Image: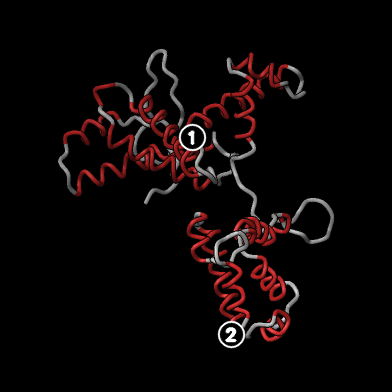
């Protein structure tokens, strides 16, 4: 496990300055150790040398992590990510291709940026939108510094960043979407104790009733008048089947059969529909169809 150490506390000497190169205090001289690491086969000796190099360069990784503080992630977590990037840099570094610091710094920085890109967003945001967010953030900061802190317009941000106004608006929305608000969070206005979840509407069951009524209308229109009367008396006037039978002069059992038959027909019409020929075959007593008067008289007896 990597622990925080200082470069001065390491057994490795500080790396000498090369002409034209910026060397930090936390950049030790480990050129010979990396050359030895490349020649040592996998085993305990290699692991020990690898850990020694990681401890020597860990202060540099922590320094890079400090650049990203105050961005919604704890410094300790950022240091852990930087340490992971450092280990990757040690494993992938080739001594013959330049100084380790020149290779390690972009590797560690890239690891931290990937952490923000992949782990810190509450919702998965496309890479293009993340790039727009960064461009808009930098442009707004630059324009704000030049104008003494006053907010810049969308048009000025677009001209400064080389973006369209639509792209700027997308980036501005992404700036406010880095993290989400809990549904249990209290509303900022007043002390009424309402949470954000209290403001979210629920499904209105009345809409389902409207849909059902509209679906059943056509089937009800196609029923014979007597059958429509029976359904009305039963479901709207709340009359019993016996009272309906007395009212129409037919048996209670006949009322029961007609109600079942009507409901099944209306349900079938609402779900799939039937053509007029099928309807007339099932309802021969419908007004306007052949033999309806005789059948009606028979059912009434």
Does 122 appear above or below 251? above
Q: Secondary structure at mark 2?
A: helix
Task: Quadrant for residue 151, please give it.
Answer: top right
Instruction: Determine which quarter of the picture holds residue 56.
Output: top left
Residue placed most toward the observer, 30 or 64: 64
Using the numbered discs, state the Cα–Cα distance from disc 1 to disc 2 in whole angstroms: 66 Å
What percent of the width, then of the height, locates residue 187? 76, 53
| Residue 243 position in % (x across, y down) | 72, 84
- Residue 205 % position (x, y): 67, 62
Q: Earlier in the sequence, mark 1 or mark 2?
A: 1
Q: x and y percent of residue 142 in the render?
A: 66, 20
Using the image, tell me which numbered label, if any, was put on residue 60. none
| Residue located at (64% from left, 54% from top) | 182
Which residue lies under the disc numbered 1? 126
Position of residue 238 relative to residue 214, above or below, is below
Element assignment for label 1 = loop
């Amino acid at each position: 496990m990597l622990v925080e150490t200082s470069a001065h506390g390491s057994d490795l000497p500080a790396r000498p300055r090369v002409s034209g190169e910026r060397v930090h205090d936390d950049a030790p001289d480990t050129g010979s150790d990396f050359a030895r690491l490349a020649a040592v086969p996998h085993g305990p000796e290699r692991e020990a040398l690898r850990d020694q190099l990681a401890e020597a360069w860990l202060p540099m990784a922590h320094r890079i992590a400090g650049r990203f503080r105050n961005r919604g992630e704890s410094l300790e977590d950022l240091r852990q990510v930087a340490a992971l990037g450092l280990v990757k840099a040690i494993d992938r570094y080739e001594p013959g291709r330049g100084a380790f610091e020149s290779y390690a710094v972009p590797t560690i920085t890239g690891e931290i940026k990937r952490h923000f890109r992949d782990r810190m967003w509450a919702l998965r945001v496309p890479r293009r939108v993340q790039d727009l967010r960064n461009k808009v953030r930098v442009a707004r900061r630059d324009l704000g510094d030049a104008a003494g802190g006053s907010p810049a317009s969308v048009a000025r941000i677009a001209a400064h960043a080389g973006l369209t106004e639509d792209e700027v608006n997308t980036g501005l929305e992404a700036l406010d979407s880095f993290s989400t608000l809990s549904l249990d969070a209290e509303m900022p206005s007043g002390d009424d104790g309402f949470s954000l979840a209290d403001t979210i509407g629920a499904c209105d069951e009345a809409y389902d009733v409207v849909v059902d009524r509209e679906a059943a209308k056509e089937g009800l229109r196609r029923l014979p008048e007597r059958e429509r009367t029976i359904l009305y008396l039963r479901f709207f006037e709340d009359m019993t089947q016996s009272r309906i039978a007395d009212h129409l002069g037919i048996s209670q059992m006949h009322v029961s059969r007609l109600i079942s038959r009507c409901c099944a027909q209306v349900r079938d019409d609402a779900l799939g529909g039937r053509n007029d020929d099928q309807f007339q075959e099932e309802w021969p007593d419908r007004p306007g169809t052949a033999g309806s008067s005789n059948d009606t008289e028979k059912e009434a007896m």
